């Protein structure tokens, strides 16, 4: 049986919220793409990440229906788990490219680039109440990140994410790649309050990369 760690990534300051993540630390136990896709679909989490090389940090990321070149929540979660096991890595390597990792107390941050985030659209609504009032999912097609300012001066955003892929994930509780894209579009650090109780912290860097970070907890039944 394949060993799977289940985490909650981008938890709120009180430890609530967070998006469930499946982590397969021994990628060799599920070697084929077809088998990985089947496992990710069976688990039903927004993403499942496979660690293929624990020294180099090579990883493979799957949703229940597609393989992703980059995603923030599985990389933050995996980085946190490796540190908790005493084997932290400074760099993770998904298909999109090298992703630097930084640790700051209970926060874990990874850095990616907006061009790695494809097929996602952000849409600004008039108020946080309008974001809260959206049905899940809203009418329409394609990956939607709906957001509004909760406190524009402080950089606090209210957001919800709807993959609309037809694979059973109706709403993503917390999404690092979409948060990265929104940060790129707005050009400023953000404190994103997403889903039922998640928090994502972002910061653009001079080289064009964007740090995405948050808290991680082990998901206990």
Image (cartoon, rainbow, N blue to C red):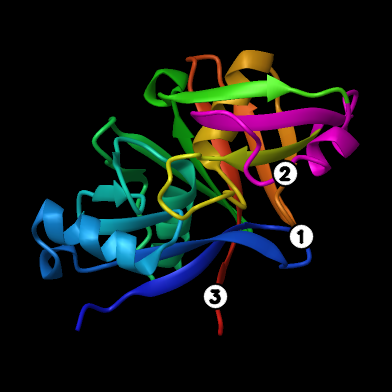
Q: Which residue is drawn at 14% across and 61% down?
A: 35
In the figure, residue 86 lies in which quadrant? bottom left
Q: Which of the two marks, 2 or 1, is nearer to us in this view?
A: 2
Q: How crowded is mark 2: few (under 14 residues within 10 Å), some or many (20 or more)?
A: few
Q: Where does label 2 land, which residue?
A: 135
Q: Is residue 193 above or below residue 220?
A: above
Q: Which residue is drawn at 70% across and 50% down?
A: 195
In the figure, residue 34 lies in which quadrant? bottom left
Q: Where does label 3 land, which residue?
A: 219
Residue 124 spot, x, y in % from top left = 74, 21
Q: In this view, does 39 lie above or below 68?
A: below
Q: Which of the two marks, 3 or 2, is nearer to us in this view?
A: 2
**Mark 3 falls on what kind of element?**
loop
Q: Does the magenta stretch include residue 151?
A: yes
Q: Does the magenta stretch include residue 184?
A: no
Residue 142 spot, x, y in % from top left = 49, 29
In the foreground, 220 or 80: 220
Q: Where does label 1 land, which residue?
A: 13
Pointer 2 and pointer 1: residues touching (CB < 8 Å)?
A: no
Asked whether the viewer can see residue 116, the reply is yes
Give the mark, 1 or 3, whose residue is nearer the N terminus: 1
Q: Which residue is drawn at 20% across and 59% down?
A: 36
**Mark 1 falls on what kind of element?**
loop
Residue 192 spot, x, y in % from top left = 73, 39
Label 1 to label 3, Cα distance in Å? 16 Å
What is the magenta range? 127-156
């Amino acid at each position: 049986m394949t060993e799977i760690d289940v985490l909650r990534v981008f938890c709120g300051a009180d430890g609530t919220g967070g998006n469930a993540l499946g982590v397969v630390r021994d990628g060799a136990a599920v070697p084929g793409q077809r088998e990985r896709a089947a496992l990710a679909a069976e688990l039903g989490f927004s993403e499942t990440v496979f660690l293929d090389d624990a020294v180099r940090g090579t990883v493979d990321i799957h949703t229940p229906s597609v393989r992703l070149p980059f995603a923030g929540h599985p990389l933050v979660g995996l980085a946190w788990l490796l540190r908790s096991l005493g084997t932290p890595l400074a760099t993770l390597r998904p298909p999109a490219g090298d992703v630097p990792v930084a640790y700051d107390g209970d926060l874990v941050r990874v850095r990616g680039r907006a061009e790695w985030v494809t097929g996602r659209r952000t849409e600004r609504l008039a108020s946080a109440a309008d974001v809260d009032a959206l049905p899940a999912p809203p009418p329409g097609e394609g990956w939607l990140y709906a957001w509004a300012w909760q406190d524009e001066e402080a950089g606090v955003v209210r957001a919800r994410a709807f993959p609309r892929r037809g694979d059973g994930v109706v709403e993503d509780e917390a999404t690092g790649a979409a948060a990265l894209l929104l940060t790129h579009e707005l050009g400023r650090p953000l404190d994103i309050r997403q889903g039922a109780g998640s928090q994502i912290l972002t910061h653009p860097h001079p080289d064009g990369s964007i740090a995405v970070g948050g808290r991680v907890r082990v998901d206990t039944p």
